[in-house]
Amino acid sequence: MAEVKLTGLSKHYGDFAAASNVSFDVESGSFLSLLGPSGCGKTTTLRMIIGFEQPTAGDIFIDGERINDIKPWLRDLGVVFQNYALFPYMTVAENVAFGLKQRGVEPAEIKRRASKFLELVGLPGKEDRFPRQLSGGQQQRVALARALVIEPRVLLLDEPLSNLDAKLRAEMRFELKRIQNETGVTSVFVTHDQEEALTLSDRIVVMNHGEVVTVGKPKEIWERPTSAFVADFLGVENIFAPDGFEPGAVVIGGKRFAAEHDGQGNRLVGLRSTDIEIGGDADAGLAGRVQQTSYRGSINTYVVDVPGIARPLYISTATDLPIGSNIVLKPRDGAVLILDPDMEIAAA
Amino acid sequence: MSTGVKRETLIIGAPASLWLVVLLVIPCLFLLFQSLTPLSGTGLSLENYENLVESGTFQKALRRSIIVSVWVTVLTVLAGYPIALVASRASPRVRTLVMVIVIFPFLLSAVVRAYGWTVILGENGVVNDFLIGIGLIAEPLRLIQNTFAIIIGETHVLLPYMVLSLLTVIQRIDRNLEAAAMSLGASPPVIFFKVVVPLTLPGLLTGMLLVFSLSMTAFATPFLLGGPRSPILTVLMYQYAYTLFDWSKATAVAGVLLVLGLGFVILHRFVSRRLMRDAEAGR
Ligand SMILES: Nc1ncnc2c1ncn2[C@@H]1O[C@H](COP(=O)(O)OP(=O)(O)OP(=O)(O)O)[C@@H](O)[C@H]1O
Ligand SMILES: [Mg+2]
């Protein structure tokens, strides 16, 4: 178990910054996710920690020791890849034993530890299989056992669940969490899936264009995204410019709604489709007209045109709303998100 | 697919097949027939082969052929891996440069290549001049017209086969496997022997078979660089046929080479098919 600290870590390819001034801490024993869209520099950051990539600036510390110049094979890190990367010509047992052999562990001890970790990942008795004889989920469990058996200082995972189908992915998510809890290994997990990040992490680092956009606990990031990019990435459907701000309130479509903000202008507001109430006092709410519906079972999503707002609003509700019906809507109390404008909003 | 050859295939393949039969299969069969015909008398017998196998010259040439081929195989492996690794991992420009240098000997005639080696290895060649120049030796070394020269020359010619065989498999390696090994504590040499070599085994084996068999059956380079006193099998056959006019022995050597060649082709097909199957199975 160890703590990881990145300070101003950057990687430039020519003029292009794949990662730029990335800084964050991972507490000992905790689980941190690097979350962001494709190409935002998650893998690049991870590869610099592992040592496959030399940073062009910045430092990496593990337990206070600067490891920039330590060879990758001496860093004592466990790595799990999206495509499992098991040695195809070795059995499961040989795969798991690989790291221990490099460390000169006795054969009897290797055997003991390998079966202990295969048990931990839920694959006892599969020692003599070859990787090709296992399912994707099982292969990823072997990869986990192989990375954990060396008792790494930090476990690094690059989209380890992305190759699995949806059902298996959900199952492996819980497994991963259980295994991390049982071993207590400090983990850095790369993903572009917000749900994975939210359910697994103690903390989340959201990245975009090679930079860290925000760092926080899943609950904080989910409930109070601070920027338009983060809100959009977490699936906040309605992001738009309000009419203006007043002390303790925001003006939308000519109506005031309570919202906490620091008084700075040029902010955007965000509203989850599920955070909009329908009905109530017409004076306090916004009048709108239903344009489109999409049926999703118990809860349907409607596209509602609201005069005074440039974009139609998305609303999710269990109420049945025919196309063309006029409704009154208003944000739930405290649900209006005030967002830094770090993203272009597409025109309506 | 397995229901035999399609009619169209037969029609398209017919002219080329006819060509091969007339110019290759018939002469080969004729040659085999001749080698089985004893000088004295009629009928078929192994007399020519018996005479040949008993002759010391043949035994020496056979041994020399094998020694040369083993050395050439080993040397092309030793030189081929680093070259193929550099070519597969370098920037596109460096890769092109490496490949041009490797393929270049292909484009030269054997005579030009042999002349090149004479310039380098001859009595007044670059190597001897240098060694005498720095005072390491007083008299020039005999580096040409011997087995050593054949090994050097053949390694030069056959290296591209090894590099290309290795390159195809090296390019298919999943780099994450090397990354995984490295994170588990394997230093680059360990990664080479425990990850790269096992994953490139099919290419290595085909390359070795190819180089060994081509080296066993090569003629021009051994003839030009080896000289008459250290013939390998092919050169010995030439000497029997055109210097000594001993056709019975010449055809017998040819028969031996033919059988060896066929053997290598069959072995090669067998090995590569097996390796392919294993590779597909994910071995
Ligand atoms: N060797 C390289 N040379 C040039 N550019 C590179 C190199 N490696 C990565 N990049 C670029 O750096 C950026 C970040 O890449 P990275 O692999 O870190 O993204 P990622 O966040 O892991 O994305 P994904 O979710 O698709 O895996 C990308 O735009 C990529 O094209
Ligand atoms: Mg990536």
Image (cartoon, coloured by chain):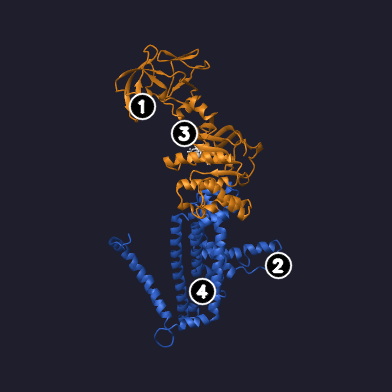
Chain colours: A orange, B blue
Disc marking residue B188: none
Find the distance from the CA under tag 4 to the CA under tag 3: 71 Å
Answer few, some or many: residues within 10 Å of disc 4's Cα (few below 14, many 20 plus, some between 14 and 19): many
Q: Give the residue number, with chain letter if any, for mark 1.
A: A301
Subunit ID for the residue under disc 4: B
A257 versus A207 height, above or below = above
Does A342 sit above or below residue B75?
A: above
Whether marks 2 and 4 lie on the same chain: yes
Residue marked by disc 4: B233
| Residue A14 picture quarter | top right
Label 2 is found on which chain of the structure? Answer: B
Secondary structure of the residue carrying tag 3 is helix
Residue type pointed to by label 4: Leu
Do marks 3 and 2 share a subunit? no
- Identify residue for label 2: B138
For the point 53% across and 71% down, the residue is B65
